[in-house]
């Protein structure tokens, strides 16, 4: 039995959740998200502003894994429409900077040309102090994926730490050829 799947999910007052034909629709102050529960063994019900998931076949390995998965997805949808998700990236390096032009993020990170990234319509991207990029949105997966794509342009290198890194990312620096730190 999944320990995650059996936990109930509390629904905040400003969030509305509708279930029809194994489709979960969550609507809140920040937006609206949908999720289809494709596993027929998993059922979702709402009682007293709380969401409960039940697993019809707890002995099936596939149903057990989906039980925890769908609980996490629905929980993230509720958090997303109520509060939203945010990732912060820092540009570390001499001359590294970023700026927003329209719906594009322009990043200068040591290449011969600036790298231009299109910002998806459902993601909000801000640049503060030219070296701090704040990515926010209601869908946790999309925010995380866009942040990973931006970080992938110039990941931090292990010797000097230059590159694009997450806010709380810890880097293990390597010693150079001389062995000094």
Image (spheres, rainbow, N blue to C red):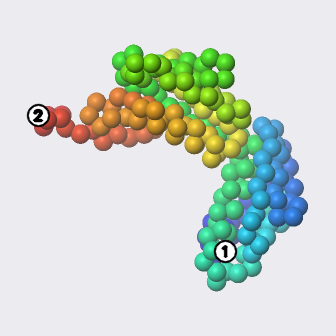
Q: Residue at x 33, y 32 (%)?
A: 161
Q: What residue is shown with label 2? A: 178
Give the structural element (helix, strand or loop) at label 2: loop
User: Where is residue 100 drawn, in percent x and y?
Assistant: 60, 19
Q: How many marks?
A: 2
Q: Nearer the viewer, residue 141 or 44?
A: 141
Label 1: few (<14), some or many (≥20) within 10 Å?
many
Determine whether 116 is above or below 51 in the image. above
Q: What residue is shown with label 1? A: 63
Quadrant position of residue 121: top right
Residue 52 visible to an observer of this rendering: no
Give the structural element (helix, strand or loop) at label 1: helix
Classify residue 77 as left or right of residue 86: right
Q: Quadrant of the C terminus?
A: top left
Determine whether 127 is above or below 56 in the image. above
User: Where is residue 10 drawn, in percent x and y?
Assistant: 76, 56
Q: Residue at x 67, y 69 (%)?
A: 67
Q: Residue at x 61, y 37 (%)?
A: 86
Q: Quadrant of the N terminus?
A: bottom right
Q: Residue at x 58, y 38 (%)?
A: 146
């Amino acid at each position: 039995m999944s320990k995650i799947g059996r936990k109930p999910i509390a629904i905040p007052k400003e969030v509305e959740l509708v279930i029809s034909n194994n489709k979960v629709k969550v609507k809140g102050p920040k937006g609206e998200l949908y999720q289809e529960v494709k596993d027929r063994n998993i059922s979702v019900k709402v009682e007293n502003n709380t969401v409960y998931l039940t697993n019809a076949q707890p002995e099936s390995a596939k149903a057990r894994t989906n039980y925890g998965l769908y609980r996490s997805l629905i929980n993230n949808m509720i958090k997303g429409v109520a509060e939203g998700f945010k990732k912060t990236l820092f540009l570390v390096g001499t001359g590294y900077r970023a700026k927003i032009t329209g719906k594009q993020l322009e990043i200068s990170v040591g290449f011969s040309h600036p790298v231009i990234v299109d910002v998806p319509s459902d993601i909000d991207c801000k640049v503060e102090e030219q070296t701090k990029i704040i990515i926010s949105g209601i869908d946790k997966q999309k925010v995380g994926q866009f942040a990973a794509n931006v970080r992938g342009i110039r990941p931090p290198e292990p010797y000097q730490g230059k590159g694009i890194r997450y806010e709380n990312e810890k880097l293990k620096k390597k010693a150079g050829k001389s062995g000094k730190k």
